[in-house]
Image: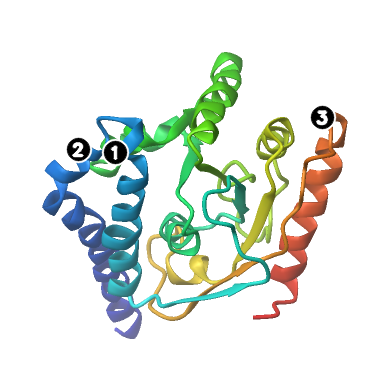
Amino acid sequence: MLQLMKNIGYVIYRIWFYVLVAVPIFLFFPFLLLLTLSESTYPQFFWTARNLWARPILYGMGCFPKIVREQRMVKGKSYMLVANHTSMLDIMLMLVVSRNPFVFVGKKELVKIPIFGFFYKRVCIMVDRDDVRSRTGVYRRAQRRLDQGLSICIFPEGGVPDEGVILDQFKDGAFKMAIAHKIPIVPMTFYDNKKRFSFTFLSGGPGRIRAKVHPFFETGILSAEDTSTLREEVRNVILKELIDPSV
């Protein structure tokens, strides 16, 4: 009986999440649509998504952010934001962590998510990981966004790791792009999102969600040959923090 009650609670909690995701989009749909008609209004779209969508979702779920910053981003400067990926809350938490407007690079499959997918395809850089032309096109589209003063966000594991894996191997894309465009990499550790809202249906619950922004990795003097070294150095920073949290 106790387990049944827990399962009912999990279901209600999960339904509540999707309600919180959908309601702001419905409420502000005309305004959001207007802000996606031109790339020049993306900073305003980002502000809206950060403050009127991501924050209400996290606080509405009872997931209160605690953010520790070892280094702060400079307003108006472009960065490559990377973090471990275990939950849909990662999207909302990333929006809350970064005050600098950024564009997500993500899988084209996310377009299929009702409501969310409509705006995702309009404002994010989509990539088909099985299509070489799609992966190449990401660099061109990212350069245009960087030229506009925006940052880029990639979850370098390329997906959610299998159960029991603390941190999956990183793909090269984020690090190649950072080196090619000479922008600093901002590593972040998200500690609690899987516990709060994992991809396992009957799981989750409210509580603190912690994030740590680590010292940045500069790429100005690096070349393409340094990609694998940079990739592993960044991964090791996040992995060490997941194994032995300091927050």
Residue at which label 1 appears: 119
Please, is residue 193 above or below residue 18 in the view?
below
The spot of residue 195 in percent (x, y) is 50, 71
Residue 239 left/right relative to 200: right
Please, is residue 177 above or below residue 69 in the view?
above
Q: How many angstroms separate mark 1 from mark 2 (CA)?
A: 8 Å
Q: Earlier in the sequence, mark 2 or mark 3?
A: 2
Residue 27 left/right relative to 156: left
Foreground tag (1 vs 3) = 3
Q: Mark 1 Cα within 10 Å, few/some/many (few <14, many 20+)? A: some
SS type, badge 1: helix
Number of marks in the rendered image: 3
Look at label 3 and name its amino acid.
Ala
Q: Earlier in the sequence, mark 1 or mark 2?
A: 2
Q: Nearer the viewer, residue 4 or 124?
A: 124
Q: Earlier in the sequence, mark 1 or mark 3?
A: 1
Residue at which label 2 appears: 33
Residue 237 left/right relative to 190: right
* Image quarter hosting the N terminus: bottom left
Please, is residue 118 above or below residue 80 in the view?
above
* Image quarter hosting the C terminus: bottom right
Look at label 1 and name its amino acid.
Phe
Image mark for residue 224: 3
Residue at 61%, 16% in the rendered image = 132
Residue at 69%, 65% in the rendered image = 214
